[in-house]
Image (cartoon, rainbow, N blue to C red):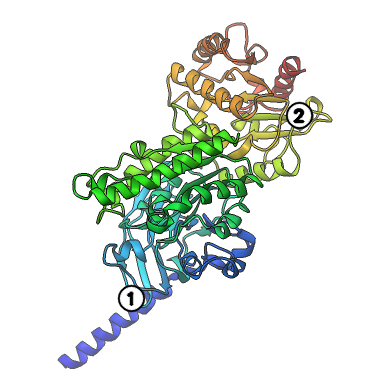
Amino acid sequence: MKKLNALFLALACIASTLQISAQMVWKNPMNETFHVVRGQAWQNELKGTYNRMPDRAEKTIRKAVWDLSKHSAGHSIAFRSNAPQIKIRYQVSGSFSMPHMPSTGVSGVDMYATDIHGQRHWCSARYAFRDTVTYTYNKLSYGESASKGFEYELYLPLYNDVKWLEVGVEEGYNLQFLPASQEKPIVLYGTSIAQGACASRPGMAFGNIIGRKLEHPVVNLGFSGNGQMEPEVFDLIAEIDAQLYILDNMPNMGGDRLPKIYERTINGVHKIREKSNAPILFVEHYTNSHIGTSVEEEGSYKKNNLELRKAYRTLKEEGVQNLHFLSEEELGLGQDCSVEGWHPNDLGMQVYADAYVPKIKEVLKEYSTIVPCTQQRDPYNWKERHEQVLALNKEKAPEIVLIGNSITHYWAGEPTATIARGEDSWNKLFKGKVVRNMGFGWDRIENALWRIYHGELDGYEAKKIVLLMGTNNLDKNTNDEIIAGINELVRAVRDRQPKAQIYVAGIMPRAGKETRVAALNETLQVRLHAEEVTYVDLSAEFLQPDGRIIKELFSDGLHPNKEGYQRMAKMLEKAIK
């Protein structure tokens, strides 16, 4: 009887396990019709793979570089889900670990969640390294965004190639893969350090930290022991339409390669400059790990750095523009920042990133006091609208740009929205003009700043740019903070569109906040005088003599209705003729 009971119990456990497995819905990101791998250049040629270089590169680059290019370092997959449990399963081709780097870094994955306010959170997991590697993320919760879920980014292994990968959620929950951005990337060409040695997990590789901090796509072309500044690799790098090229090769240029640093640097930069005027950042190698213990090692790296500086000076003397330099002193790595004297540990990776990020911000003119971020507070797809703006700008450069929140978003124009409350007034005001509606529902100043930093004003010359921002910051920020934020926006616009006439519209009056908005606009107008902008007052057309809004002009006390947009167009027409 006991044996029979034990048999029934075993069968019940097996049935339970099968039932749980059956409840999981698995999806392979490679089955999507759009490109899913983030951090991958040559997207058209690499569809369906996790490689870092196109197949044709095998014929021109050394075998060691080609083999390393199959590692998925710097790549990630993004998806949106509201599932309380997310599972990852995949297979890799090489060994799980190395003597100085754990399996979680060499062959593991790493997941971060972004909430509806654009705040990022790391996700802990249970994992098992077997023939099929599994990561399980349990008890995920979503709070106010329970129905929408989070946007997840899954970083892929740093030192292994992925044969296949699937993401699973329980049946009934949402799982939607997201397309890779078409924004110009930061290209990082370097060594094993750039590839990710010796981070404990993929998210801690300094290139991935940079990507999270700046939210720009980063193409990782770090090749362990083989970042040797070879002309064949520079030929490929020059094909990438980047917003920044980083050359961090000095750790692989010692010994008999020392005499080649100067020539290869000069020639590599010339190859890039034949196709791109984007900024190029040179990076020295740190020597602090050997100070006081190995004069020979310390001296060899300093020789590399001296050759790099020599090449940098020569290029500057030649008149090559937009060159930048990150010195060993600025890197600031201490003696506790490495595993064995060469490769950074997690502390070293963080120090690397902390040195890189402000330098990149300086180069890209992203020196804001507020923190740019994304958001997903409205039902529409915020990232998708951003990509639509980028695509439309490439297709047809706008003459007039309106940057705003839902008041602008749901007026009219392109990209089109599900709501258009004022098409007649929009078409009359902008008749015959190429106008881009860069209004995003629920956007705050920090969200608009993110969009500006991520390409919405790049690649064309607008004649007029109108800013109508700030109302969604009223519940979060003080008047002084909002005014400072609007001035940050103006600065960011001016850096990217120096020839455009910039107009700043005062915050629209809204029910219950008329007094505060009036005081804020009065101060804003004064503080904008130092900027090369024109202030546009929209309030008069929307207020009664007692200072309260004219309710008949609004759909909800905040958003104008058809007649409200007509009055708004009337005021803008006077200002931007």
Residue at horizontal 36 percent and vertical 78 percent from the top: 131
The secondary element bearing badge 1 is classed as: loop
Using the rendered image of the protein, determine whether residue 291 is visible from the camera's viewpoint. Answer: yes
- Seen as rendered, the residue at the extreme top is 545
Q: Position of residue 461 (x, y in %)?
A: 71, 31
Observer-nearest residue: 571 or 577? 577
Q: Tell me the distance, in whole angstroms, between the alpha carbons under discs 2 and 1.
A: 60 Å
**Type of amino acid under label 2:** Trp
**Type of amino acid under label 1:** Arg
Q: Position of residue 172 (x, y in %)?
A: 47, 63
Question: 433 above or below 52?
Answer: above
Disc 2: which residue? 426
Residue 30, quarter of picture: bottom right
Question: 154 above or below 467?
Answer: below
Q: Position of residue 471 (x, y in %)?
A: 53, 24
| Dot 2 alpha-carbon crowd within 10 angstroms: few under 14, some 14 to 19, many 20 or more | some
Residue 156, quarter of picture: bottom left
Observer-nearest residue: 238 or 481? 238
Observer-nearest residue: 452 or 551? 452
Residue at horizontal 35 percent and vertical 52 percent from the top: 204
Residue at horizontal 30 percent and vertical 52 percent from the top: 344
**Contact between labelled residues 1 and 2, with CB atoms less than 8 Å apart:** no
Using the rendered image of the protein, determine whether residue 214 is visible from the camera's viewpoint. Answer: no
Residue 550, quarter of picture: top right
Where, quadrant-wise, is the C terminus in this rendering?
A: top right
Q: Is residue 287 left or right of residue 167?
A: left
Q: Is residue 292 left or right of residue 66?
A: left
Q: Earlier in the sequence, mark 2 or mark 1?
A: 1
Disc 1: which residue? 130
- Seen as rendered, the residue at the extreme right is 432
Where, quadrant-wise, is the N terminus in this rendering?
A: bottom left
